[in-house]
Image: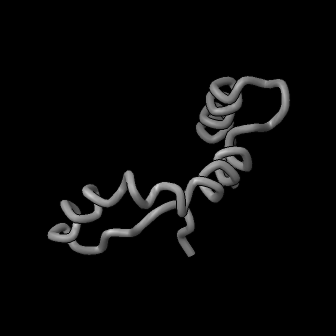
Amino acid sequence: MWQAGDVVTHLADLPNALAQAHDRHARYEAAQRRLFEETFDHGDQPDEERAAQAIVAHFTKKSP
C-alpha cells in the first residue's frame, strides 16, 4: 500500500491533488522520511556510487 502521498488515478483529479499537496504534506512526511532513509541511507558509501555500481552490476551479470 502506498504511504508516501495521495494517489491520483484519474488525470482530471490532478489539479485538485496539486492544489491540496502543500496542506496535506504533513500527513505523509514521516513515512516519506522513513522510506527515503530505507532506500538511500546505507552507510558511508555515497548513494550515487551505490547506484552506479547497481547499474553496472545489472548490465554485466551473465545470463543463466
Counting labels gives 0
Front position in the image: 24 or 5: 24
Residue placed furthest toward the front? 23
The foreground one among 23 and 11 is: 23
Q: Is residue 16 above or below residue 44?
A: below
57 lies left or right of 21: right
Query: Which x, y percent locates residue 10?
Result: 22, 73
Quadrant housing the C terminus: bottom right
Residue 15 x, y percent position in the rendering:
19, 60
Quarter the N terminus occupies: bottom right
Compared to residue 55, the image places residue 26 above or below, namely below
- Near-viewer residue (64 or 37): 37
Q: Is 26 positioned to the left or the right of 50 in the image?
A: left
In the rendered image, the residue lying farthest to the left is 12
Q: Residue at x 32, y 69 (%)?
A: 8
Horizontal placement of 9 versus 51: left or right? left
x and y, in percent, of residue 40 in the image: 68, 40
Q: Residue at x 68, y 29 (%)?
A: 47
**Colour style of the rendered protein structure:** one colour
Task: Give the residue at x 79% y 25%.
Answer: 45
- Residue in view at x 53 percent, y 56 percent: 26
**Image position of 26 (left or right of 9):** right
Note whether 24 is above or below 39 in the view shown: below
Residue 42, image quadrant: top right
Q: Horizontal and vertical percent for residue 52?
A: 62, 28
Quadrant in the picture for residue 7: bottom left
